[in-house]
Amino acid sequence: MTIKKVLVIGAGTMGGGIAQLCAQQGVDVVISDISQDLADKAKSRIESSLAKRLEKGKITAEEKEAVLCRIVTAGDLSAAKAADIVIECVIEDLEIKKKVFSELDKLARPEVILATNTTSLSISAMAAATSRPDQVVQMHFFNPPQIMKLVEIMPGQKTSRETLDAAEAFAKQLGKDPVVCKNEAPAGIVSRILGQLLNEATWMVASGVAEPADVDKAMKLGANHPMGPLQLIDMIGLDIHRAKMETLYTTLDDPRYKHPKLLDEMIAAGNLGMKSGKGFYEYGDK
Ligand SMILES: NC(=O)c1ccc[n+]([C@@H]2O[C@H](COP(=O)([O-])OP(=O)(O)OC[C@H]3O[C@@H](n4cnc5c(N)ncnc54)[C@H](O)[C@@H]3O)[C@@H](O)[C@H]2O)c1
């Protein structure tokens, strides 16, 4: 089935990017958040991103307008009634996500798939908050979703084969090249492997081995990584990175995933990375 209408919930870094991706691929999308204002701000950010693409000659003014016309904003979940698929992108907090899934279950048509973009929380726990656990699935996009080619698709314990196939088909409809995991495991493939690498980089700084810029320089020049691990954490958000490490640490009961106190101190000071204007690096105005 070709998806025509998507509801994206959570108008932050990922929700905004996924909404832009959907609209760029010709799919109508509603982006919703806890307030109309937050959703509108996400649409303004998409407009700025499209303006840059226009400046670079990657799209025409008509294409920019067509993409923007496909994006509607909302301050509640009522658009779930008309959606062909829902992609949840709210903050990485299981209780909040479970509440969103329970509300969605009441609003969305019975056949509609409810997907989560969680990094590392339990898909089965979110599915259990609904009456359709066979239709709940992880569709994990990568940052920035309009550019990164991969979508990791992962089942919960009760997810059906049909749901996995439909999620894979939708990822392909959006121009992505998905990987489908066989079983549920926290943080999927990329985030679990990469999480450890990023975590190790924070320990390097915390234990005074090297400055952030030198850790990043070393990984770029010595391992040929396109960007440094600490630059990447700033892009992901320190809070999002920490939430993932905490889930891995507790669910896999493995000390390799423990994060340093430095990360807690930076987050407590409001230094969340690019989105707050400061993380391991300074970004000036947000
Ligand atoms: N940042 C990344 O690089 C990245 C990559 C892949 C997956 N993820 C995952 O995607 C999800 C979102 O991450 P993000 O980086 O976009 O976070 P973010 O903090 O940028 O945005 C989260 C948004 O959710 C909204 N929100 C909170 N509670 C809500 C509710 N009850 N209803 C509607 N909206 C609500 C917030 O107002 C905020 O706008 C998380 O689960 C995260 O783990 C993040």
Image (spheres, rainbow, N blue to C red):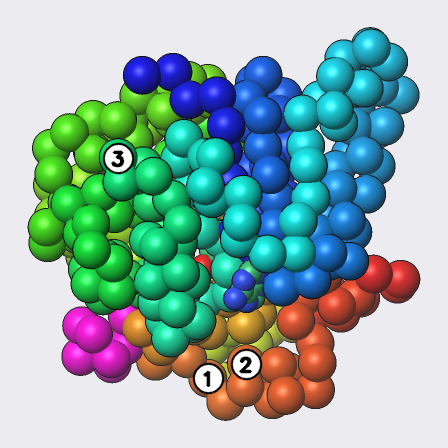
At which x and y percent is residue 222? 50, 47
Does the segment drawn in magenta span residue 30? no
Residue 20 in sight: yes
Position of 181 relative to 215 (above/below): above
At which x and y percent is residue 225? 51, 42
Q: Secondary structure at mark 2?
A: helix
Q: Three-letter amino acid code at disc 2?
A: Leu
Q: Three-letter amino acid code at disc 3?
A: Glu
Q: Secondary structure at mark 3?
A: loop
Position of 231 relative to 87 (above/below): below
Whether the residues at callouts 2 and 3 have beta carbons within 8 Å, the answer is no
Q: Residue at x 47, y 44 (%)?
A: 80
Q: Quadrant of residue 212?
A: bottom right
At which x and y percent is residue 150? 40, 32
At which x and y percent is residue 33? 62, 57
Residue hosting label 2: 263
Asked if ligand 1 lies within 8 A of label 3, the reply is no
**For marks 3 and 1 on the same chain, the one whose residue lies earlier in the sequence:** 3
Assign the N terminus to one quadrant of the image.
top left
Whether the residues at callouts 2 and 1 have beta carbons within 8 Å, the answer is yes
Q: Which residues are magenta?
A: 248-255
Residue hosting label 3: 111
Crowding at dot 3, Cα within 10 Å, few <14 / some 14-19 / many 20+, comes out as few
Per the model, the C-alpha gap separating discs 2 and 1 is 6 Å
Per the model, the C-alpha gap separating discs 2 and 3 is 42 Å
Residue hosting label 1: 260
Does the segment drawn in magenta span residue 252? yes
Q: Which mark is residue 52?
A: none
Position of 202 relative to 161 (above/below): below
Crowding at dot 2, Cα within 10 Å, few <14 / some 14-19 / many 20+, comes out as many
- How many labels were placed on the picture? 3
